[in-house]
Image: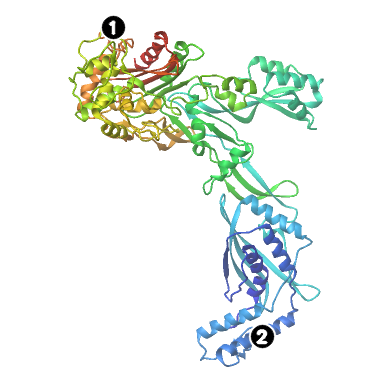
Amino acid sequence: MRRSTALLLVGAILLPFISILAGCSTTITGMSICSGYLESYAAEDFEACFDYLNSKSARDEDDAKRMDEDVYATAFYDICGVKPEKSDSELAYVIPHDVTQDQLRQVDELYNSRIADELYVQYTYNNISKDEFVSKHTKIFDALGVNSISYSLEPINDGIYLVGGHYTLTYHTEIFGDITNTYSISFKKSSAGKWELAWTPALIFPDMQWGDSILQVTDTASRGEIAMSEGVVAQNVNLFAINATVAELADINAAAGVVSDLTSASKESILNKLDTGSDVVTLGYLYPDEANSYTVSTLESIAGIEVIESSQTGRYYPFGDMLVHMVGYAGYGSSEELDELNANLEAGETPYKSGDVIGKAGLEKQHEKQLRGIDGVKFVIKKYDGSVSSTVCEVEKRDGYDLHLTIDANLQIRLDEVIENTLYGEETSAAVVVMNPITGEILAAASDPGYDANLFARGISSEAYEAYVNDKRAPFLNKITSSTYPPGSIFKPFIAAEALMDNVLTANSEFTWKIENDYWTPDGFGAWVYPAIKRAKVNNREPVLNMRNALLHSDNIYFAYAALKAGSDKLLSFLNRLGMDEAIPFDLPVSKPNIVNEGTEMYIKLLADMGYGQGELLLSPLQAACMFGAFANGGDIMVPRIIKGIYEVNGISDVPIMQTEPTVFREGVLSKSAIATIEPMLEDVVDPQYNGTGRPLRVSTYKIAGKTGTAEIGSDKSRVLAWFAGYRTGVGVDEARLVLVLLDIKNTEEFNSLKFQIAREMLK
């Protein structure tokens, strides 16, 4: 049976259109259903399609019929060697019995190939211009994010000739997935005897009619919140709108001045809003903490101004600067920031747009992907009268995921209070870490001074920003993670552990070399051409200088000797095993430790200095705390974690998306026997009955093992880094707690004692 010309007529209109969009050649096959796939499109493709279809003319019916019969008969003869005979019906030929199915297939292919070169359809546009045609397609395709098209078509026949066709077209998009619709096209003869197809908007989407438009409707998603064990530290709040009915304002200039005085908006910007021609104007927004009775009553005392709660939300930090270096803040993204985020989007992620709120610092920035909500978007067909006829495609909104922190709210509040009540002086700063050394959970943390996250979330004034910038204590710096410091004497327990584990010393090894006025010049380790090593002066010093007494009095000479006796190979190998060759993993970036500066060759003075935590050694307080935790955790250093889990809000309940688990950073860095030897010595350091450097701690509720440290800084030695690290001993995992305090203070005993006041409150 001969194939109909229907497919060719459909192909002449649809396939050139689709093929031009794909930038490929048009191929029409003789199958009753045709399909294909397009990888891209551009505006110039629509222009080419319009011009292509507008250039073709069709033969009249009789010419087309004769052409169809002649081409088929010729193709049959060329393949089979005989001419086919007409059957009683004009729609078919009688096929000889000796003609095979393979030959018939070849006849079909040859017939379709030849007639495709002869038969065309005139394309008409119902008065749509080329610019309109291109604009309609490009705007809709761009809005939907169409990146490829696939299609299939099936003809409708009326005798030999096509009266219409159905085709299925799929727009492949990243955001909405596949959008598939079935379309119908029909043909008719014009007065000139030519076959014509009338284009309508229904060929874009079946429900579209002339005068319709595509409308985008956005359902705004909420940003995820950040919570402690009790209480939210970063939350979304509804803002209060300051609305003005312009016609009711007796004195616009005076009203603008009052609003400016009570908000962060300039008077000029408020006057510009009042001059837009709108009847009712929103002059600005107030956060709940700003919408106090005085502010609201003052604003509403002006006739024409009303303050009402709105659906507009803002980011609010109820505790101000508490945990600010960990939590960070979120605010409106700049064009550069949004461009950078959009450049790193993963497949299927919705692009950022102007006005979006993004994380700017801390966890708000580090976990932007989890906290960010994805707005719901749907495209609907809007009628000329404003009504909606149908939805083209839709993606439901997904609110951002919540971060649940490991922070103990009560402990964190107490830490902030004790820092505020203890520290004083314009040049005093601190870094404090409170953690569970067995699980790695951060229970409280403070980098002081901080800054008020609310000022940055709402738009900080230049005066307030300059005050922060000019503060010598660096309030923007996260001193816990982003800076490294010489660890000083809190490093001595590790030197003691290395000496025990590598059989360099025993607990009873005594230092018997000559010490004059607390100075020692090393002998027997190579030529010593450097100043003698000095130890701190101690009243009522224990007479025997062994490991226990060296830790008790924090004796630099003993631990310089231990490092020299171990040698650089053993000591450097041990420090690498401790994890000082890399930054410890964390939910925020952590500065990498330093053992020896790049380009520095090891020499005996540097080796001796490393024995008491100086030389070129540098550690972040966070990594130092985790390392010290190995004494409390059987020799394992845990990965610190401040995120307990990531949760999706489902009604009134939170559904966990991810929950963190304790993870070992470095396993078995300290032997059980070394810990058993050193821990009682560290308990003596803070025991008030002994003359240890940590005796001012005085925690009565728990047995504590701890170590003090002091590192002089500055060329004039007028300032010091005062360290304390200590942990509860003899407790289970639930009560396990380690505290590390670092103060940057004046080099006086008065300031040095402040570290004990902070540590005591956190350990008791």
Quarter of the image where the N terminus is located: bottom right
Q: Nearer the viewer, residue 567 or 172?
A: 567
Q: Where does residue 733 sit, x and y in percent of width and height?
A: 29, 26
Give residue 56's position: percent from left, percent from top: 73, 72
The local secondary structure at tag 1 comes to loop
Q: According to the image, label 2 marks what residue?
A: 69
Q: Please state if 96 lies on the left or on the right of 740 as rendered.
A: right
Q: Could you tell me the amino acid type at mark 2?
A: Glu
The C terminus appears in which quarter of the rendering? top left
Quarter residue 655 falls in:
top left
Q: Secondary structure at mark 2?
A: helix
**Mark 1: amino acid:** Asn
Q: Nearer the viewer, mark 1 or mark 2?
A: 1
Q: Are marks 1 and 2 in contact (CB under 8 Å)?
A: no
Residue 354: assigned label: none
Residue 109, relative to residue 394: is it above or below? Answer: below
User: How far across and down, in percent of the image, does residue 85 sit?
Assistant: 61, 91
Q: Look at 69% across and 24% down and name the residue there.
A: 265
- Give the mark, 1 or 2, whose residue is nearer the N terminus: 2
Name the one closer to the observer, 397 or 361.
Answer: 361
**Residue 257 visible in image:** yes
Other-residue count near label 1 (Cα within 10 Å), few / some / many at <14 / 14–19 / ≥20: few
The answer to which quarter of the image holds residue 411 is top left
Q: Using the image, determine if residue 121 lies above or below residue 130.
A: below
Viewer-nearest residue: 640 or 409: 640
Query: Residue 350, how many percent across, how many down?
Result: 57, 45
Compared to residue 231, the image places residue 667 above or below, namely: below
The residue that mark 1 highlights is: 539
Q: Residue at x 59, y 26 (%)?
A: 456
Name of the residue lying farthest toward the bottom: 82
